[in-house]
Amino acid sequence: MPLFALEALTVDFRTDDGVLRAVDGVSLAVEAGEIVCLVGESGSGKSTVALAAMGLLPQPAGRVTSGAAWLDDDGARTDLVQAGERALARLRGRRLAMIFQDPMTSLNPYLTVGAQLSEVLELHEGLAHAAARARSTELLRQVGIPAPESRLDEHPHRLSGGMRQRVMIAMALACRPKLLFADEPTTALDVTVQAQILELLCRERDAVGCGILLITHDLGVVARVADRVAVMYAGRIVEAGPAREVLRRPRHPYTLALLRAVPRVDAEADAEALVAIPGAPPSPLALPTGCAFHPRCALAEARCRETRPEERRTPTAAGDVRLRCHVETSP
Ligand SMILES: Nc1ncnc2c1ncn2[C@@H]1O[C@H](COP(=O)(O)OP(=O)(O)OP(=O)(O)O)[C@@H](O)[C@H]1O
Ligand SMILES: [Mg+2]
């Protein structure tokens, strides 16, 4: 029983232009002690997956229309989709935490950084005030905030974007959650801090044995930290498997295109030219027929325009690769 398992999760948003399916039948597991990366272009549904599992979809527009999100809480399985708000509130912070794409979503502008961190620690960990303050200082130090003691008394708006992001990461890690959703946790940060934060997440994974679902645009990040990777396109997972296997031998033309669009520091100058993916991702309100990627795919054939590819599994030495593609690249 994995720590966390999405089963055919489907999420719709009601909009003025109609109902939009942001996530369509996504299945994905995160084992304890594992970092799974979720990648894909903007709008592919990555944040929606995490928000749905946290019970934090924007209301009243967003709704899980089918599927489940199982959390193994010390042997007790809870479907986060069916769990009520009270059960979710108990799990959040203590068992489940999320680092949001936009730091201000989870920081209270009216409370000092120290008060917010202490609140979490006092509430969930039962720490006394002084102990909570000491632990808060330590947490800020761990996320690379200089002079952490003096930052405790500041309000979030006084901090730079990068500092806020780090405070939010400290808050998410405060109660050592078993499952962490990290939505682009390092995008706003410079490379040095980015490396520090990734290292911190890996250390946390090793120390607590937590599972991490890491959402990122950055395939360099995936290569560095992911055990497994899932590639999303237009609300569906098109390829998923062991990170090394998927990065070395991408089978889906979309995965290959994403990899070709990444500048490689180790590549010899212009040995491998960067190739932008032609066109743009489709609107979920007007998905192409067949495979949603076909209008942008160099390998598309007639059947790709006509039928949606079912998922196939290919065994590899490192584990199964799941693929939704009629043609498949030849590595
Ligand atoms: N509150 C909302 N109301 C209506 N549609 C929404 C809402 N939030 C997201 N969507 C739509 O759902 C789809 C998936 O959005 P989501 O934010 O999950 O994508 P993402 O992969 O996280 O993108 P990014 O990389 O830009 O963060 C998009 O088409 C988006 O426009
Ligand atoms: Mg997002």
Image (cartoon, grey):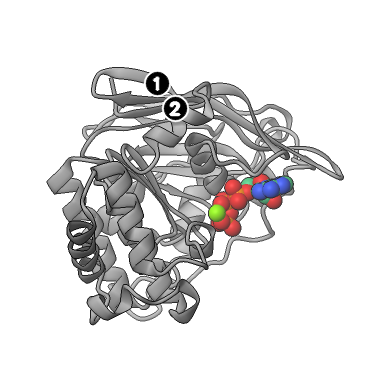
Question: Label 1 to label 2, Cα distance in Å?
Answer: 9 Å
Work out whether residue 179 or residue 141 is closer to the camera in this orientation and state it.
141
Q: Which residue is mark 2?
A: 87
> Where does residue 122 sit, x and y in percent of width and height?
28, 49
Work out whether residue 285 or residue 50 is closer to the camera in this orientation and state it.
50
Q: What is the crowding at mark 1: few (fewer than 14 residues within 10 Å), some, or many (at least 20)?
A: some
Vertical placement of residue 24 versus 56, above or below: above
Kindly identify the residue that appears in the image at 58 percent across and 45 percent down.
Answer: 45
- For residue 132, say whether it is visible: yes
Q: Secondary structure at mark 1?
A: strand
Vertical placement of residue 276 versus 83, above or below: below
**In terms of image quarters, where does ligand 2 lie?**
bottom right
Mark 1 close to ligand 1, CB under 8 Å: no
Q: Is residue 18 left or right of residue 244?
A: right
Do residues under tags 1 and 2 come within 8 Å of each other at their CB atoms? Answer: yes
Q: What is the crowding at mark 2: few (fewer than 14 residues within 10 Å), some, or many (at least 20)?
A: few
Image quadrant assignment for residue 224 = bottom left
Kindly identify the residue that appears in the image at 24 percent across and 46 percent down.
Answer: 176
Kindly identify the residue that appears in the image at 35 percent across and 18 percent down.
Answer: 77
Q: Is residue 91 left or right of residue 199?
A: right
Mark 1 vs 2, N-terminal side: 1
Image quadrant assignment for residue 170 = bottom left
Q: Secondary structure at mark 2?
A: helix
Q: Which residue is mark 1?
A: 78
> Where does residue 234 sit, x and y in percent of width and height?
63, 43
> Where does residue 173 sit, x and y in percent of width and height?
28, 53
